[in-house]
Amino acid sequence: MEKHYTDSKVKGVSTGTTILAAIFDGGVVIGSDSRASMGGEYVSSKTINKVIQVHDRIFCCMAGSLADAQAVIKSAKSHLSFHSVQMESPPLVIAAASVLKELCYKNKDELQAGFLTAGWDSKKGAQVYVVSLGGMLISQQVTIGGSGSTYIYGYVDAKYKPNMTREECLQFATNALALAMGRDNVSGGVAHLVVITGKGVEHVVVPGDKLPRFHDE
């Protein structure tokens, strides 16, 4: 398809968010803040949920252009639903991440969105995948993204450890989001967290006034 640009320079979209996913012993936690900003200049929503369910035990977090991310997720949900019917079984987590990767890669010149995909399946258990801008796919034990992530790399490196308990991982994720939201002016609101295990899915929402504080705000 031929592309036409009215300007030789395509202006980037300034966005803000904090997203993370971490594997613990028996499951995975995925979470985000809830603030949406317009061009990184003013807050358009304080309560948006950036943790989206794409199948029963597969969730993804989005960062970048909200419109782009929502369009990709809508298409991915359709692909995975059809795949599940064809295979007569739930899709694997890697299948969901691969669908997102293909959509991002095929539309890399138009999209400004990245994703964290986390979930649990009977083949490999808990998994986390990163789909970056341009469609690169990476498997990781713990990962963070968005503008707020730049403030918490040290915390994540120091505090994350494999085989944490559910409670330890949930506290780790809550602390990481709280630290990022306290420093990044375009991250904030409440902390949306989802715990995914072989037994099911649990949603946890931590209001802004209940988040742990590590410094005077």
Image (tube, grey):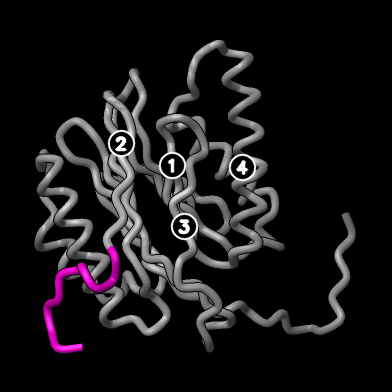
Pointer 3 or 1: first along the chain: 3
Judged by depth in the image, the label closer to the viewer, 4 or 1, is: 1
On the image, the x and y values in percent for residue 107 come to: 69, 54
Secondary element under disc 4, as helix, strand or loop, is helix
Gap in angstroms between the C-alphas marked 4 and 3: 21 Å
Occupied quadrant, residue 78: top right
Which amino acid, by three-letter code, is at mark 4? Glu
- Measuring 55% from the left and 44% from the top, which residue is drawn there? 101
Pointer 2 or 1: first along the chain: 1
Pointer 4 or 3: first along the chain: 3
Which amino acid, by three-letter code, is at mark 3? Lys
Gap in angstroms between the C-alphas marked 2 and 3: 16 Å
Pointer 4 or 1: first along the chain: 1
Tag 3 and tag 1, C-beta contact below 8 Å? no
User: Is residue 60 found inside the magenta-colored segment of the image?
Assistant: no
Residue at the spot of label 1: 59
**In this rendering, would 41 be left or right of 70?**
left
Residue at the spot of label 4: 102
Residue at the spot of label 3: 50
Residue at the spot of label 2: 196
Gap in angstroms between the C-alphas marked 2 and 1: 9 Å
> In this picture, which residue range is highlighted in magenta?
207-217
Judged by depth in the image, the label closer to the viewer, 4 or 3, is: 3
Which amino acid, by three-letter code, is at mark 1? Phe
Secondary element under disc 3, as helix, strand or loop, is loop
Which amino acid, by three-letter code, is at mark 2? Ile
